Amino acid sequence: MGLWQFLVQNRKEVLELTGEHLWLVGAAMTLAVAIGVPLGILVTRMPRLNKAVLGGANIIQTIPSLALFGFLLPAPWIGERADRLAILALTLYALLPLIRNTSVGIQGVDRTVVEAGRGMGMTDRQLLWRVELPLAMGVIIAGVRVATVISVGVATIAAAIGAGGLGEFIFRGLAMVNNQVILAGAIPASCLALAADMGLGWVEKRLSRW
Amino acid sequence: MTDNAYNGPAIEFRDVSFQYANGLALLKGLNLSVARGETLVLLGRSGSGKTTALKLINHLLSPTGGQVRVEGVATSQWDVIRLRRSIGYVIQEAGLFPHFTVAKNIALVPSLEKWDEARTTTRVAEMLRLVGLDQELAGRYPRELSGGQRQRVGVARALAADPPILLMDEPFGALDPLTRAQLQREFAELQRRLRKTVVFVTHDLHEALALADRVALMEAGNLEAALTPEEFQASPHPLVSAYRDAFLSERP
């Protein structure tokens, strides 16, 4: 049986697992942006926090993903459901590129432009929303792009703790020593990663004109 | 502005010092006042403290000693946002917002002050005329303009909300000599009509003498002399004559 045939025959499950995969990644990225971008802004306002925040995010990055899933297991509420656990772990992984790109993006905005705005009487908030964030948006989206592609990959491991997603096929295929089943998970996952990379790459390019 | 009865100098430095926490002193005991409607040029080499003095006026920096008074009120007593919005600010390379159109750049302070749209549009058109720019440029982005055009937009942006004071930090420094000379002439003409209180920073003596009512010569954080262009030409002050020798000898 060819791979294509397998995918067609199991299309219901493929779609279901792809949906789960998208849910894990989408929810994690939403959370990560909601946490990472404000933290990135914060460290540009309070440079003393820079080391602690980036250091923390860096340490999280170094934890192997399977171990991180395990560490989070005893957490209350989170540990009750596998998908919550997986989303939290993916969120934590996505933080570093988001915090770093947000702060680097804002710091990279031409200082003379910022000082002109300040000198003309813009408040800190107006500078942030009207000047710094719009001009840093390309770099911030580049961070979202990197984080999303990583998340799509790491999310396959979430199947190991029963959180579903395309990793189901991969682990099942490993257990069955069946390459076709492995590929049925791996190929759609790669396609998701490529689509996210290209889609966000396009957005990034649109926003990096300045 | 805050006190209509106030009749003193528009800007006054009273024994103003500025130094960094590491002890590096950029300005030492500066005493200087700028009359309403006067164009004062701060002349000096880089590191002489002229830009520091300028940034103390709109409180981008705050003095570590003494007082800078604007319209009779110490800058530390001003609501800093109000202060800055009543002072136009033009810097080298214009500092335009690259993601704003020309019109939006010019309308910056009006938009911060929440002018209505009709008034803002009228004002932008008026400003473009004032600085000699074609109305068609309103929809362009700064990167689509020449250096000279950008600098004109910078001046238009600074004047848009009709501030009584204008600060200019080497506004024409990055332009080619021909464009620079033209903008200097036009600015002198503009200033004759508008009579703003202008503080203009430059290291170019020709520019200083062409635009100034008074030239304040700075050196290593000190004010060496404040002279009219005529006095400057004749002064026996050693640093003044050093400047004359360095610059005016270039002329045939």
Image (cartoon, helix red, strand yellow):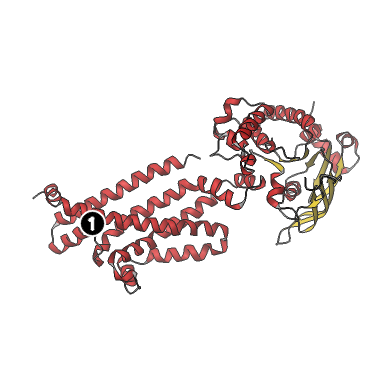
Q: Which residue is mark 1?
A: A166
Q: Circle 1 — which element?
A: loop
Residue A1, image x and y in percent? 8, 50
Residue B241 placement: quadrant: top right
Q: Amino acid at mark 1?
A: Leu
Q: Residue at x 22, y 54 (%)?
A: A186
Tell me which corner region of the image, top left, top right, bottom left or bottom right, holds residue A155.
bottom left
Q: Position of residue A190 (x, y in %)?
A: 26, 50
Q: Residue at x 72, y 44 (%)?
A: B86
Q: Nearer the viewer, residue B26 or B75?
A: B75
Q: Is residue A107 left or right of residue B155?
A: left
Q: How many marks?
A: 1
The chain carrying label 1 is: A
- Return the residue nearer the eye: A167 or B218: A167
Question: From what the image shows, is residue A190 above or below residue B154?
Answer: below
Determine the residue positioned at 24% across, 53% down. Answer: A18
Residue B249 sits above or below residue B2 on the image: above
Say whether residue B150 is visible. Answer: no
Q: Is residue A36 left or right of residue A67?
A: right
Point out residue B183 in the picture as x, y percentages from the top left corner: 70, 29
Query: How packed is label 1: few (under 14 Cα within 10 Å), some, or many (20 or more)?
Result: many
**Up/down of A44 relative to B227, above or below:** below
Residue B230 appears in the figure: yes
- Quarter of the figure with residue A72: bottom left
